[in-house]
Amino acid sequence: MRQGPLLSRRRLLAAGSATAALPLTPRVRAQEAAPLRIGAVLPIAGSTIPTSRVNLRAVAEAARMGLTLGEEDANRNGELMGATMALTIANAPGPEAAARAAQRLVARDKVSVLVGGFTREEAEALSGVASRTGALFLNIGATSDALRHACNANTFHIEASAAMYVDAVFGWFIRAGYRRWYLVHDDSPEGQDQHERCLVSLKERHWAAKVAGRGVLRQDDSRDFAPVLAEVAAAEPDVVLLLTDWRTQLNFLARYEVSGLTAPVTGFPEPATQMRDFYLASREMAQVAGSGYRAALWEATLDAYGAREVNARFNARWGRPMDPPAWAGYVAVKIAFEASLFAGGKDSAGIAAYLASEQALFDVSKGIGMTFRRWDHQLRQSLYLVKINPDATPSLELDAILARAALVGELPAIYMPGTEPVERLDQLGEIDPSRACN
Amino acid sequence: MTIAIARQLARTAAVVVLAAGTAQAQGYRVYASNEYDANVTVIDPDTQTATGTIKISGRPGDVRPRGMAVSPDGKTVYISVSDFLPKTETPEDAIVAIDVDRNEVAHTYRAGGNPERVAISPDGKQIWAALEATAQGVGFDAATGAELAKFPTGVESEGVVVSPDGRFVYVTAETSHTVTVIDAQKLKVVAHLLVGNRPRDVVFARDGTRAYVSAEIGGTISVVDASKHKVVKTINLGLDSRPVGMDLSPDGKLLYVAGGGTSAVYVIDTTTDKVAHVIKEKMGRRPWAVAVSPDGSRAYTANGLSDSVSVIDTSCMCVTGQIAAGRGTHSVRVGLVDAN
């Protein structure tokens, strides 16, 4: 796979005079019959799985809606150029089931692109299938930095990395003056990794802040928070960061509120915590502590950069706001389809090579062209800060659901004339331009 | 529709008085659409002040005037009017025609589909609009308002222009990265071509041999051979430039491109396809549109984040003035008036 140098403003401006037509013109022949086949593996669990941290049905449903709208938009656009795509969705909760489903999608349904990954284990399984079969895997839900470190040639990440989210959360809060942090994480490998990344971020980027304390919870559904709550009380931090799953965050918030602790709380933004249903649940569990600020991959009330239009199309299609997992699913299809169009074919190797190339630039309605970092195949992008509405209601009217949160910030800022856009986007996450995924 | 011209005495504006001796071959006014004020600012180029506004709707924030075009004789300014609800059809979706001499709304053409930009055929008989919400290009008979035809484009259609010979209509679509080519006489789609990432505006060269398409996310200008409807060159302005609106000098030798991302205007020499000037100093914030005066001595930008129109003196390629407009200044056009 060809690996070019990083995009740079200098390189772009050096070519600022007339150039021969860049490979923007696709090599798609009109009336091309076979569609680009994309297979999505989603944990749309049945009712047999109890409500617990592993039940990601709501997230998967959101992703399904986004993927479907993506297919519809892609086919509408592709019709102009004689290109089509076909989406197949497999219901497979858990890594073993996800791997089996992915293998079937590749072998039987001839998909060249796999989409999914809502836990680290699922994403690792799907990435493994991609490596073995040659399919392309687009990760839309797993934040683990370990996945980025693995740097598989056929795996690309649309979901933001844990490092990006941690950097964004610290960036917003520390600039607002919150400098003493109490970090609560669970004892899972991912929880520990997130904690370690927090320490790195504070050490290397946010010197004005420090860790006031650390609490460790068992990764189970118990609610034994008393020891940690006592430590938080003693530490008197400015802010508490919960590096746990969505369900533990909700339960902790409830206990935190009744304990009388008042420092703001924010949580690691795994996909389930970015859903508007989670925002309502958070507020209902703890009206004050649960109505704080959260990081998000997308925001359903965005109205700039074409976001108004894509949010409106989603609202009209599904009667629901476009939650971030839905946006990630939509963008995965968009990216795969456009890459296929510009790469001139539907084979996964060609699409992967295109995604890793300098020409691969995508409009994801965030105001600036997005590219994949060559050292970890992470989509560069800005993240959003939202504030949960303390007066949010359980009404299922679209406007009421939208009103459960409001956009309050963007990081990095998009409109910054005079700054180099790629460098600006690389303010978040792990930066290692010396590496390249092979 | 009620018509009102309100005196903007309270508005402060940076005024640059025309230098003595500057001669205008023909009088003109500058019109700027204000997306969030539901009106159009009228600017006197001699005094470089806003002399009034033309109300498009009494519901600012709901009704949204955006792209504009001028009739061949310069006497009518057309404005595409929509709303902020992409998936809801409202009565406001229309093309509004303003009589430049009287500064009054002269006609309204019902459009539907959230028209974003509008174009007029060289003979003034056809009006074409890009319907953002329905992904279509639509043509109207300018005399009767009757719909001539509607054509599918890519999702989120935006830019529209008619070739100087009146034969072809180009419509851009933001999410498909395409230009749809419509034969305006036979009323059928001729081709779809891929251009840069997120195309916005499109203009034809004065001689009709080429067209230029701005790509906001790609930061590029696609140069199209209009005889073959094919991209033959791509001019890179940089990833951060976010080019949108364009206009040509009267002689066609310079292409002015409004770069919203860098708050700059890029001036491209069309004989070499190279960037000859980048005008940044004192530019308003996020210029999205640009219009050149009939004699080419000035260019005006519509600046959406500073609610203003910047005045560029093309002899120095520098900004010499700022004129306060309305909220979310979106587009700018020049309408001709009798010199006396």
Image (cartoon, grey):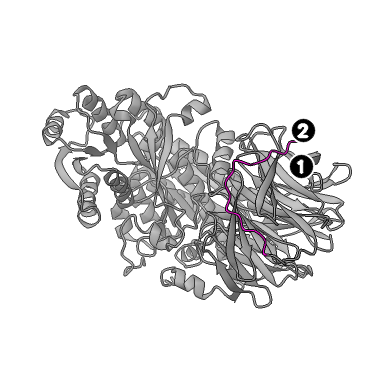
The numbered mark 1 sits on a residue in which chain?
B
Q: Nearer the viewer, mark 1 or mark 2?
A: 2
On residue B96, the disc is 1
In this image, B234 relative to A271: left or right? Answer: right
The secondary structure type at the circle numbered 1 is: strand
Label 2 near label 1: C-beta < 8 Å? yes
Magenta span dominant secondary structure: loop
- Residue at horizontal 51 percent and vertical 28 percent from the top: A399
On residue A345, the disc is none
Q: Residue furthest bottom?
A: B272
Between A14 and A230, the residue placed more toward the observer is A14
Residue A268 on the magenta span: no
Residue A134, position in %: x, y?
44, 61
Residue A52 visible within the image: yes
**Magenta highlight range:** B1-19
| Three-letter amino acid code of the residue under disc 1 | Val
Name the image quarter holding residue A292: top left
Q: Which residue is mark 2?
A: B1
Name the image quarter holding residue B300: bottom right
Residue A254, position in %: x, y?
26, 25
